[in-house]
Image (spheres, grey):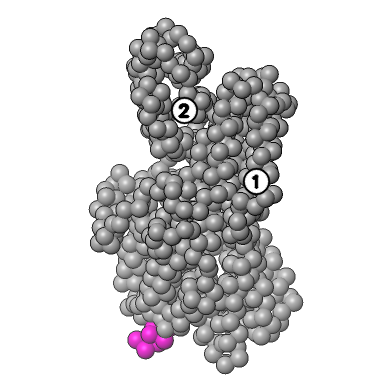
Amino acid sequence: MPPFLKNLPLTWNVGAVSLAEGVRAGMAVAVTVLLGQVLGLPHFGLAALGALLTCFADPGGPLRRRAPAVLAFAFLAGMSYGFFGYLRGYGVLVAAPAAGLAIFAASYARIYGQGGLQVGNLLSVVIVLALDYPAGSLLGAAEQGANIFAGALWAAGLTLLIWRIHPFKPTRLALAEVAGKLSVLAKELAALAQSAPDMAAFEAHAARHRRGVREAIETARGVALDTFRRRGLVSQRAAQTSVRLQTLEQMFGGLIALSDVLEHDVAIRPQAARVLRLIAGGLAALGRDIVAAVRLDTPKKLASLDRLRGEIAKLPPESEAAHVASAMAENFAVLMTVSSPAGQALSGMNNIPWRTRILSPIRSNFRLESAPLRHALRAWVIVTPTLAFTMLVHQQFAHWATITMILCLQPYFSATWVRAAERIAGNALGGALAAVIGLMAQTQLALAVIMLPLTMFAFAIRGVSYGAFQAALTPMVVLLVEQILPGADQMNVALSRIGYTLLGGVLAVLGNLLLWPGFEHERVEASIGQALAAHAAYADAVFNALLDNAPVPDAARRTAGMASNNLEASLARALLEPHKGRDAVLERGAVVDAALRRMAGRLSVLALDRPSLPPEARAAWQEWRVFLARSLAGETATRPALPLGPGAEALTRLARQVELIAQP
């Protein structure tokens, strides 16, 4: 088996189970199905389909982010289903090209982020289904579109109005996710400190945790900004959120610095391990209380903070570990006591006019170099003939090939390959489950009743794994088809779904290989360059803080961390592709990534535990500043003489990393 088949990242996130989302989606779908059965309205199954797809369209998060996506989908889904159902009556030569152009526009909607991506994909599904069930007349098309719209509107009302989510809860959950990931990072770092590992173990720890923490921080930042735009910044809860997020990010920098210190200072590891265990436990407890929206400055937590300070006091007073840990203890104090807008405001709170928000992404991405435009063109070229073929063969469930192709097709080959594998495997398992359910439920009412627990389960595990979600979704779709088309053989439905899913997955992979292929290995060098530039800016900001007594460079550290994350993600995608003959680029990327992670750790130590520079050493430090900048820019530079006074060892460690990067 080729290596890129063995390394598919089929991940499971058990912590993403959401019972509330499952119950809400179950109510949205099951109520429409049962209502159709009770009132004797078989075509009301279309309303259930509209409700189901609207649950998919909900991107989650603050109401301000969710409402436009959900309401836009509800309206456009009803219009699209009616229009293309009517257009189907004019024949394949008219309907297929028109649908292809509409799917091109829907695929291009990913330029508006996750919400645009979900709405665009689901509208494409609606268009394909409408062509499969043509309306006999204009009135019939209007009725079908109204059914879809009614179900979608019911689901939208349930999620946005009836079952409302607390406006700050998504932000609290995001902050708790950051605290939880930091807790795990600290706990495993404590275990490393006790086991006396070598340098490779610390590198593996950094690779395993730092990317996830940085992604959690950026996700929390985005959720918080969405909440602030709707609720405003001038409130106690907004101020708490802003300061707590900034403080958690500072603690991330502190843990990076401690990792670097422990990697090189073996003697202090046992004492530092006790400090790290207290930090890990404190972060885990704070995360739980942030979700619960309870006070953090309780006597128990303040006593825990005193215990942490007591352990820090046992560290050698002049050690780097003591200075970094003391700063983290103060971070804990801020997290517990902040209740007023005394901290920093989050960046990115600029109010952009709605016209600019709509038109600017279209203009900036409407060129062939843009991955979203190439993706939309690729979808259009493949979808149009596929739709024409499925309409000509008149096979009842052939639309699943087109739907699978649309949902599996991604801008990059590696992502398409993974999505196709997960969807095909999930559908095969779900098809077997549908056959078992069909043997137990023999009546329309029984099938309608089973829809409730099936929908609840499918949406509850939606975030756990795409493959698991597909396995749970397939029997639900099979039963929904039975509601729309009574008398359909369930085994035939299940087997058709599996077979056409396989065909659609193959089409998606071939399309990505043949049409404007988006191979990640072509972007690895660019990602390396961006990471080097970001860390050069971070190093310059740290030296600026040391030489000019400037503030700690939080923004530069964040940019460098994000650049490292992007490089790691690029390498991970490239490894999923056939990369024979390109191993040298990937190996260089791995070396650069590891060196920059370690360099960032030492820079964090310098920023948090600033050495006192004597006047006669400032010129030498300036020479080192230039040396690091030139080396990271790819220029040949000679290592300067070490300055007198403290901090010389840190410069030596930084030099080792930049010289490692410079090696051919």
- Quadrant in the picture for the N terminus: top right
Q: CA distance from mark 1 to mark 2?
A: 27 Å
Q: Residue at x 65, y 52 (%)?
A: 298
The vertical placement of 392 against 200, above or below, is below
Q: Residue furthest top?
A: 641
SS at mark 1 in the image: helix
**Nearest the camera: 566 or 370?**
566
Q: Residue at x 48, y 38 (%)?
A: 565
- Quadrant in the picture for the C terminus: top left
Q: Which mark is residue 607?
A: 2
Q: Residue at x 37, y 89 (%)?
A: 139
Q: Position of residue 278 (x, y in %)?
A: 68, 38
Give the magenta-colored segment's residue range: 138-144
State whether the magenta stretch is mostly helix, strand or loop: helix
Q: Position of residue 271 (x, y in %)?
A: 70, 26
Q: Residue at x 67, y 73 (%)?
A: 453
Q: Residues within 10 Å of mark 1 (few under 14, many from 20)?
A: some
Q: Are marks 1 and 2 in contact (CB under 8 Å)?
A: no
Q: Which mark is residue 302?
A: 1
> What amino acid is found at the position of numbered circle 1 in the picture?
Leu
Q: Position of residue 658 (x, y in %)?
A: 45, 19
The vertical placement of 25 against 663, above or below, is below
> What amino acid is found at the position of numbered circle 2 in the picture?
Ala
Horizontally, is 130 left or right of 186 in the view? left
Q: Position of residue 595 (x, y in %)?
A: 50, 24
Q: Earlier in the sequence, mark 1 or mark 2?
A: 1
Based on the displayed image, in which of its 4 quarters is residue 355 positioned?
bottom left
Q: Is residue 361 magenta?
A: no
Closer to us: mark 1 or mark 2? 1
